Image: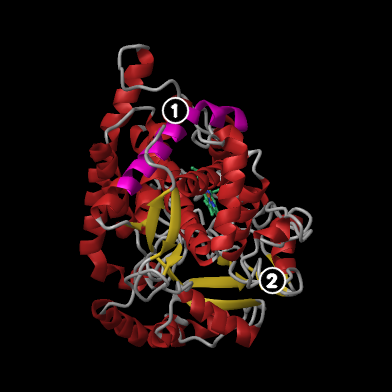
Amino acid sequence: MCPLLTEPPLPPFTSPFHLISKKNIEMSPTFSSSISLTSLFSPHHLFFSFLAFLISFLIFFLTHNKTKSKKLNLPPGPHGWPIVGNIFQFARSGKPFFEYVNDNIQKYGPIFSLKFGTRTMIIISDEKLIHEALIEKGAIFASRPRETPTRNVFSENKFTVNAATYGPVWRSLRKNMVQNMLSSTRLKEFRAVRLRAMDKLINRLSSEAEANNGVVWVLKDARFAVFCILVSMCFGLEMDEKTVEKIDQMMKLVLATVDPRIDDYVPILRPFFTKQKKRALEVRKQQIEFVVPFIEQRRRAISKPGSDHNATSFSYLDTLFDLKVEGRKSAPSNAELVTLCSEFLNGGTDTTATAVEWGIAQLITNPDIQTKLFEEIKEIVGDRRVEDKDVERMPYLHAVVKELLRKHPPTYISLTHAVTEPTTLAGYDIPTDANVEIFLPAIGKDPKMWSNPEKFDPDRFISGGEDADMTGVREVRMMPFGIGRRICPGLSMATLHVHLMIARMVQEFEWSAYPQGKKLDFSGKYEFTVVMKEPLRATIKARRSSAAAQ
Ligand code: HEM
């Protein structure tokens, strides 16, 4: 996911998403995820859930006879309670959503259904079924489900690439993002922005190590570096670190606000959540008031070129100011621009930083692979800083990044899909109001497709003769960016950022475990992506006397 966006398993500053125990999320609010029920099961919520359970029986008995005749042949799944469905079973399992899903895969197979209140989720985890849904029947499975009311507020009624239903708005927004911002030609224009951010990353790591006996937090620093790139690309303004941090805090506040609540699944409980609704509207107002001045600054800067010395030559906002969206007469409003900027920032931040954290953890655990990568960097780049153009010439670096994305897809559940018309998959009915969830962890680890899949072995892509096309067009072997019409549009930029960060981090520092000799735990937990359960702290040693930018 890119967990960026504001709703289904993605989230406005939006991202990929998840369910219930603490921090079981997948993406974010301007990325829409369907199932981020982070705080669903607080005692407060459980009380209302109990209430819902009682009311549910009443409604169930009143409506049972009417609904019986419409019964669909849904995929199998655990029998749920009236109204609340499987919510309590999930809560009682005490497991993160992805583990609960895993248990159900063992019981019900590669396609099964869950009922969360009024939402039916159909979870698919098999390569062939995923290929059939997202490629062979791609146009049918290319939509998104309805939003929760809170996410609707932050996504301006689904006015984002990730949340829009399959149709003209989605086409216009996505085409603009891909062609005018993320094409390879456009990406080249931001070379200097990336170089500066990489220098900042190295400087931050150096000063943190100096202050902490060589020890650094990997995720936090990687996250900040990639966020700096995206902020600059989005607003076209050079900002100091403090301002960037404030934008980040606002983004996090929004993500926390759009976290799904039980009343998103059991709407009869809504009257009990008026305080939260009011709070969400306040946060949205705060977000708009905070971001609009940057939008106006950029508007002024491009209307009078040369007037603002902090303005860069091009930005995402420039592509949006006069954007013609199919079926609409007016250009995006300021509130819509805030939402689209949030999506851009959300989509590429946590996802990319998460990949870097897993990658560095693997390089620490496999020092021979780290050495081989460093040797490649020395041979291809020498003593100058690694740049975009070098990445293309480093096959081993490519293999390392591909291997880390195979083993550790940053999101476990793709953004939620929905079908545009009733259809079938594996002989089961897929209704238009179902959330179709693609469960990724097992993809990329199937022993029928990969030799020794548990081993972190970049050489499988070089001497091992294995490969995988991440777009999944021919067959699905690994799909960290999703596949089909809704495949992540940020794929090229994201992989470039991961390549650059890993290469610079290894070029400048030798990485080892903290404390020395510690065996790293590779279990994951949901934050907005699947990060390391124990956040990675590492010891770094500068490889040359001045590790800072040269
Ligand atoms: C390593 C980094 C990233 C990963 C792993 C990732 C992963 C994903 C995944 C799994 C999806 C859902 C695909 C689906 O619906 O089937 C997605 C969608 C999306 N991603 Fe990313 N992403 C990353 C970086 C980015 C970046 C850098 C951007 C742009 C700034 C971005 C923007 C989006 C958008 C806009 C969508 C929604 C596409 C649509 O609905 O048409 N992502 N991403």
Residue at 72%, 61% (x, y): give it: 460
Where residue 12 appears, as percent x and y from the top left, is 39, 48
**As drawn, 509 above or below 365:** above
Where residue 449 appears, as percent x and y from the top left, is 75, 69
Label 1 element class: loop
Amino acid residing under circle 1 = Ser
In this rendered view, identify the residue nearer to me: 515 or 262: 515
Give the class, few, some or many, for how many residues have Cα within 10 Å of label 1's Cα (few <14, many ≥20): many
Q: Quadrant of the C terminus?
A: top left
**As drawn, 165 above or below 338:** below
Q: Is residue 42 left or right of residue 498?
A: left
Decide which of tag 2 and tag 1 comes sooner along the chain: 2
Farthest residue, direction front: 545
Which residue position is annotated with label 2?
A: 126
Q: Is residue 394 left or right of residue 277?
A: right
**As drawn, 134 above or below 267:** above
Where residue 362 appears, as percent x and y from the top left, is 52, 63
Which residue position is annotated with label 1?
A: 315
Total number of numbered discs in the rendering: 2
User: In 3D space, how far apart are the residues under numbered discs 2 and 1 (Cα atoms)?
Assistant: 39 Å
Would residue 167 be seen by someone viewing this image from the given angle? no
Where residue 418 appears, as percent x and y from the top left, is 59, 60
Q: Is residue 56 left or right of residue 439?
A: left
Look at the image and give the residue range highlighted in magenta: 184-206
In this rendered view, identify the residue nearer to me: 505 or 510: 510
- Asked if residue 201 is among those painted magenta in the image, a careful observer would answer yes
Residue at 62%, 59% (x, y): give it: 403
